Image (cartoon, rainbow, N blue to C red):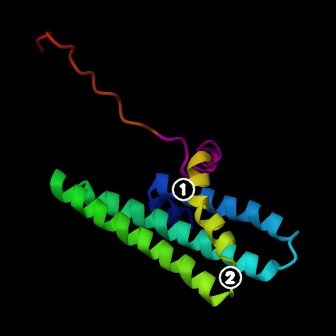
Amino acid sequence: MKKKITKINRTLFELETGILLFGAVCQVFVLFLKDKGTYSLGLWIGILIAAVSAFHMWWSLDRALDLPERAAVKFMSTHNIFRYLFITLALLAAAISRTANPLSAFLGIMGLKASAYMHFITKKISTLVYGEEVLPPLIDEPAEGQDM
């Protein structure tokens, strides 16, 4: 299992872990609400959307880095619009169907943002799974006016 997890990009793993932690914390508060079912369903639909969005951001950024600058900008813009449309349609579907609460779905989607702020926590979990991060040595750039 650890081999499968460590094949995942470390930053993506930290982001996805934070999204799940955020969902778990929010779920505790849902237990105090009267209509647990629709709020809980909406929350976890939002968490799922946030996790898929995080993966899509990583995937599209990874692909864009291999493209020339103009093509990369166009590629990222197209995929950002695609992602926002998907989120909007999912929230509309939740609102129209009335099976899931759209506000709790939006809260779940905000797990993507909350996860970015929880980096100091998810970094510790990442270190437990991946081990200590080994960064490549810094490349010393010669100061301006210095010859090599």
Give the vertical position of 62 relative to 116 (above or below): below
Q: Residue furthest left?
A: 147
For residue 8: magenta? no
Left/right placement of residue 11 relative to residue 105 reads left
Amino acid type, callout 1: Leu
Res 102 visible? yes
Task: Residue under label 2, please give it.
Answer: 100
Res 127 visible? no
Q: Whole-percent x and y of residue 1?
A: 57, 68
The residue located at (49%, 59%) in the rendering is 6
Task: Residue under label 1, please give it.
Answer: 15
Mark 1 Cα shell of 10 Å, populated few (<14), some (14-19), many (≥20): many
Left/right placement of residue 26 relative to residue 137 reads right
Q: Whole-percent x and y of residue 87?
A: 49, 72
Is the Cβ of the residue at disc 2 closer than 8 Å to that at disc 1?
Answer: no
Q: Whole-percent x and y of residue 117?
A: 60, 46
State the residue in front, 84 or 25.
84
Q: Quadrant of residue 134?
A: top left
Q: Callout 1: helix, strand or loop?
A: helix
Q: Whole-percent x and y of residue 110?
A: 60, 60
What is the magenta range? 118-133
Q: Callout 2: helix, strand or loop?
A: loop
